[in-house]
Image: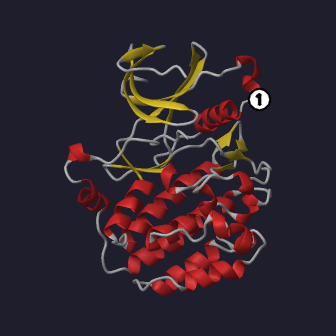
Amino acid sequence: MLKLHPPVSFGSYSLLRKIGEGGEGEVFLATPLKPSEENGGNLALKIMWPLPEPRQSHRNEHVLNFLNEALVLSYLDHPNIVRFVDFGEHHGRLYLGLEYIEGSTLQQIIEHHQKRQKRMPLDLVLQLMIEICKGLDYAYQVCADFCSLGVVHSDLTPKNILISRRGELKLIDFTQARINGEFVKPIWRGIKGGSISFMPPEQASGGTLDNRSDLFSVGLLLYCCLTLKTLYTLENWEAEIYHGQEEYIKRRLEGLPPMPARKEILELLNVALSFDPKARFQSADEMAATMRDILNVLPQHTPLTTWLATIWGKPNNAVMKCKLHGVK
């Protein structure tokens, strides 16, 4: 593979430093060679690895994922979704320019608490989940040419949620996003560790995805943040969940540790994690409203930026780097 070594020019950009690398390509902190009002600041530039057979690019899964993310993000403009900046090709390598956010993924924050064996504060977890719901609600309702796109993220995992040092939450990595309930193939057998733990049952079984599929994933994210554990894993998926044993989830939820408003949290999780989409929250806005009701009765409300400062410490010690912008 031909690797780029900053500082170096790449098309109309100057690559300043590498901030991530994966199977699909590299991510660089970049800046335009000719800044303007539209593109004056730094951005995260995702650059695909060169393809061994360019003529077969239309059949390459990585290329299709890359194109899919660029297309979906070009329609979206919301404070809780990473902003699309540019897309193109330079010397046979596709690139995607995205808003650069200095911060950490939710995965890194969860791991921070796991190492210290310290639970994340309930009020702050609810604040984060509400922000996720805001982004999802917008994506599902956004219109193009007077038609609703019905964008479903379909890969909501802790590593695909970015939280800035200023407390802004951004959904990233839309490579698997669906538009208007597109059918997906059963993929659970090929899943690599991690993603299956946040996947709704209809996605794993090849069903149709809609906004309620993402809300199932939000329920799994909420459980993970509260317990610092995933509700299920690849190992117990086939035995317990793939065959529709919803009782497994209910048994696990009953083991939810003591916390303020535990009864209300348990009721929320039981709705969000119902196997029947009709029994779930019907919109992200509805789920967010339920979480706000719980948040409003909690005795303590810690500002998000104050909490983040306790994790990161001084401004120059941010725990952010690899996989920030969805490189696999």
Which part of the image, by quadrant, shows the N terminus? top right
Indicate the position of residue 115 as horizontal and vertical percent values: 34, 64
Report the label total.
1
Task: In the rendered view, tell whether residue 246 sits above or below residue 166.
Answer: below
Residue 275 seen anywhere in this rendered image of the structure = no
The quarter of the displayed image where residue 137 is located: bottom right
Describe residue 6's horizontal placement relative to residue 84 as left or right.
left
Indicate the position of residue 28 as horizontal and vertical percent values: 42, 29
Indicate the position of residue 43 as horizontal and vertical percent values: 41, 30
Colour scheme: secondary structure
Q: Which residue is drawn at 41% across and 65% down?
A: 127
The answer to which of 142 and 86 lies nearer the viewer is 86
* Amino acid, disc 1: Arg
Q: Which residue is drawn at 74% across and 78% down?
A: 245
Residue 87 seen anywhere in this rendered image of the structure = yes
Mark 1 crowdedness (10 Å alpha carbons): few <14, some 14-19, many ≥20: few
Q: What element carries label 1?
A: helix
Describe residue 77's horizontal placement relative to residue 124 as left or right.
right
Which part of the image, by quadrant, shows the C terminus? top right
The quarter of the displayed image where residue 100 is located: top left
Q: Name the residue under label 1.
A: 59
Q: Which residue is drawn at 71% across and 40% down?
A: 146
Describe residue 165's horizontal placement relative to residue 22 as left or right.
left
Q: Which residue is drawn at 78% across and 72% down?
A: 243
The answer to which of 263 and 37 lies nearer the viewer is 263
Indicate the position of residue 215 as horizontal and vertical percent values: 62, 63
